[in-house]
Image: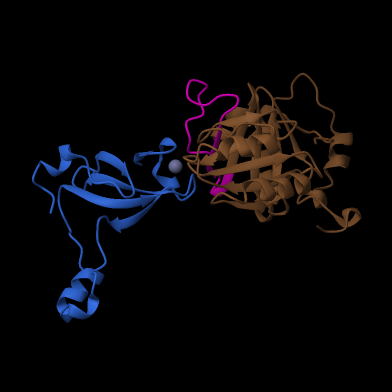
Amino acid sequence: MLLIPCPYCGEREESEFHQGGEAHIERPKDPYKLTDEEWADYLFFRDNRKGVYLERWVHRHGCRRWFNVARDTATNQIVAVYKMGSKPPKSITSRGTMK
Amino acid sequence: MANTYLRQTPLAHLHLDARAANEAADATTGVHIGERLLLGMINLRGQRSNPDFGPAVKKVVGAALPGVNETSGKPEGVHVLGLGPDEWLIITPTGEEADIHANLERVVGEFHTAVTLTGESMTVIRLAGAHARDTLAKGCPMDMHPRVFGPGQCAQTILARADMTMHQTADDAYDIIVRRSFAEYVWTWLEDAAREYGVRVITGLR
Ligand SMILES: [Zn+2]
């Protein structure tokens, strides 16, 4: 069981949360300009990274707020937690493992 | 609101008054359990970042807006639970919610807010006694050790797979706020979990 530090409530057990898929995926500004493959990439294709992965979580049974989590998919270690709308901490992006 | 003479609490069918009359508590009772009857509840959403919002609410409610997982006011009177960064639950004695709701709507209407009466959808179970915390800990994934959770704090979490809002009202007392449709399940779960400590029903809680 993971202990996840909700940015609002502090550390709670994983059973209070739901994972919401990869973070920082932006809807294309003009979908009609995309090829079918590019549109499918936006809709369906996600990284399946071994290592630090940026994903969205929601404190479903707690404060019901969404936030971002940087989690290592190999060790399950949570490296960082940051609020919706903010960028991942530099300490993570500078490792060069991110897009 | 329903006709008051027809209003029943979500646990009325368990006939807790009769239970309490038959089962007297004694020195061996480790857990006292009862339903706080028909408290008023108002869910408030709003932007704390607006410096005028908190004071405007306080003028009506009589208590300051607490931070997340904190509370303000007295548990027996009007009190406020901090549910999230922009969400609060205002709990009032029976019958006081309508006026407070109307006044809140009038006063905070100029802000970006939502004020919603929610009391009819919930009930409050009071758990008290030397083993109240042990009982809750059996079904709650949260760390409830006094060093991290104490009187005056609240939390939205899980009790035996049901959503609950927990408010520690004293060193050995908790208000458990659950949905009406979960009330009987949570009550029977709590009674079962508390059995080994000696559990007695209390009534007349307001
Ligand atoms: Zn939370």
Residue B205 vertical position relative to residue B161 in the rendered view, above or below: above
Instruction: Provide the major secondary structure of the magenta segment.
Output: loop
Q: Position of residue A92 (x, y in %)?
A: 16, 41
Q: Nearer the viewer, residue A96 or B158?
A: A96
Image coordinates of residue A58 in percent, x first then y, are 40, 51
Residue drawn at x 26%, y 39% as measured from the top left: A80
- Within the image, what quadrant is residue A26 found in? bottom left
The residue positioned 77% from the left and 49% from the top of the image is B98
Chain appearing in brown on the rendered image? B
Whether residue B162 appears in magenta in the rendering, the answer is yes
**A90 above or below B133?**
below
Residue A44 spot, x, y in % from top left: 24, 70
Instruction: Evaluate whether residue B139 shows in this view.
Output: no
Quarter containing the N terminus of chain B: bottom right
Residue A87 is left or right of residue B49, and the answer is left
- The spot of residue B110 in percent (x, y) is 59, 50
Find the magenta span and give its range: B138-164
